[in-house]
Image (spheres, rainbow, N blue to C red):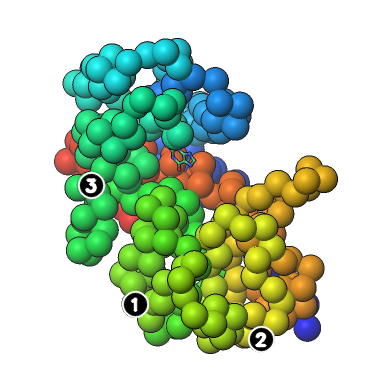
Amino acid sequence: MTARIIDGKAIAAALRADIAARVAQLDFRPGLAVILVGENPASMVYVRNKDRAAGAAGLAAATIRLPATIGETELLAEIARLNADPAVDGILVQLPLPRGIDPNRVIATIDPAKDVDGFHPLNVGALASGQPGLVPCTPLGVMRLLAAAGVQPAGARALVLGRSAIVGRPMAALLLAADATVTVAHSHTRNLAAECRRAEILIAAVGRAEMVRGDWIAADATVIDVGINRRPDGRLVGDVAFAEAVEMAAAITPVPGGVGPMTIACLLENTVTAALRRRGRRAGR
Ligand code: GUN
């Protein structure tokens, strides 16, 4: 049987509309500051999309463009200025940063209460120990997709393929917090195909084009493909061989149009969450 397609574009649009409605009810405008250092073409596209989505949801969005030649000290000073600005609720520094700037030092300088990427060590620790904090946008988007698709992580065998700081590790922590039985697989995992076949929820986040084949997937599985890879012919593909997998899985996300749109929607959600918590109000979810 052919898998049900989980339409991330539609689910993200609904989430964005919900956030815009919540923002319209507030007596202030949550502020998001995005810092872009240099002119990495992919980063320029991402940052423009984030800025537009934030504006459309009614947030006060500002993009701060800094030259690639900026020194680390000046960048840290810019972050300190945003930390001190009461109108700024969320700060995001687009990665990667130019060589010579230490991303860990940059991330650690952001006020954890404004860290809408959820990358600050305090937020990483909060997630790992099951305490409230700000959670990275892409894995949060995956949790929202599962919920919208009616897939229950509680009690399910979940496999996270990939252990990056941005996706794999926080993804595993979120699934664990939602009571899934979680396995994290990576490049050293023996018999990867057999591990994948045991999963009821399979999250692929390795960044290798079409690595997960159809016969790695159980018949009842929900497959969430976080990968975005460009083939030599220019085609965008995920980490999962979609044409094969769609014939095997129960439900699957496409690439593009699956996880991608959820990441930006969850950045907006995190900004509203940060804005409410900073004012001592409940974020409501
Ligand atoms: N570059 C690629 N993904 C991300 C992300 O989620 N956040 C930031 N800040 N930069 C990125």
- Pointer 2 residue: 219
Q: Which residue was labeled with disc 1?
A: 179
Residue 99 image position (x, y, % from top left): 41, 27
Residue found at x 34% / y 77%: 179
Where on the picture, by quarter, is residue 22?
top left
Please name which of the two marks, 1 or 2, marks the residue nearer to the observer.
2
SS for dot 1: loop
Q: Is mark 3 within 8 Å of ligand 1?
A: no
The amino acid beneath tag 2 is: Ala
Spatial CA distance of label 1 from label 2 is 22 Å
Task: Using the image, determine if residue 113 lies above or below residue 206.
Answer: above
The residue depicted at 21 percent of the width and 55 percent of the height is 125
Q: Is mark 1 within 8 Å of ligand 1?
A: no
Which element is circle 2 on? loop
Q: Residue furthest right?
A: 233
Among numbered discs 2 and 3, the one appearing first in the sequence: 3
In percent of the image, x 44 and y 34: which residue is there? 95
Q: Is residue 240 above or below residue 49?
A: below
Decide if residue 24 is on the left or right side of residue 90: right
Q: Is residue 270 visible?
A: yes
Mark 1 and mark 3: Cα distance apart in space: 23 Å
- First along the sequence among labels 1 and 2: 1
Q: Which residue is mark 3?
A: 121
